[in-house]
Amino acid sequence: MICDRCSGPLFKADVLSGASVCTSCEIRLCGKPDEWSLFVAALKSSVRSDGTVHVNDVRPKVRGRIAHKKIGLYWTKAQQKRLIRWENGWEQSTDAVGSNQDKLARVYVWTSAA
């Protein structure tokens, strides 16, 4: 099987649940995920060793897989569900594809063990 995000190979991580993991993206998917599940998987796979989640790291993992208009809503939903917390962290956006390169991007703190 091939990952629809990066064309990397998928392998079955758990035969019982049907979960697959992309060997390139390292995103764990269970069957065909809904957009929210995909967003949460992208968040989890983007947590850095210092516990931060950078928008610049998540954006390429969800581009083309989640409707553009819903991505901002999912960041808000993740905060409401206490998966992440924003503590006034900013960095320069690296998103040239989405025309955000000259803007600031938020840096969140991962707060969930989910």
Image (cartoon, rainbow, N blue to C red):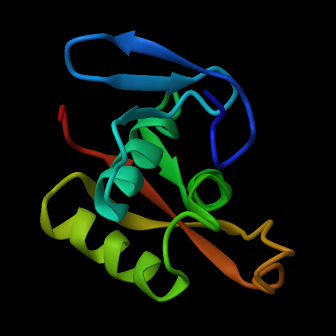
Residue 28 coordinates in the image, percent (x, y): 42, 30
Q: Tell me which residue sits at (31%, 59%) in the image.
A: 34
Q: Which quadrant does the C terminus fall into? A: top left
**Residue 22: quadrant of the picture:** top right
Query: Which residue appears at 61% of the width and 72% of the height?
Result: 105
Q: Is residue 45 left or right of residue 58?
A: left
As drawn, which residue projects farthest toward the right?
96
Nearest to the observer: residue 80 or residue 3: 3
Which residue reaches farthest front? 1
Instruction: Tell me what residue is drawn at x 61 percent, y 52 percent.
Output: 61
**Which residue is painted at 37% across and 47% down in the image?**
32
**Is 53 rendered above or below residue 12?**
below
Q: Is residue 34 above or below residue 92?
A: above
Count of numbered badges drawn on the protein: 0
Where residue 92 sits, quadrant-wise, is bottom right
- Quadrant where the N terminus sits is top right
Q: Quadrant of residue 102?
A: bottom right
Rendered view: 5 above or below 27: below
Q: Nearer the viewer, residue 77 or 35?
A: 35
Instruction: Classify residue 96 as left or right of residue 70.
Output: right
What is the x, y in percent for residue 88? 43, 70
Q: What percent of the width, then of the height, locates residue 95?
A: 78, 71
Rendering coords of residue 84 (x, y %)? 29, 55
In the image, farthest residue toward the left: 81
In this view, 73 is above or below 113: below
- Which one is in front, 105 or 34? 34
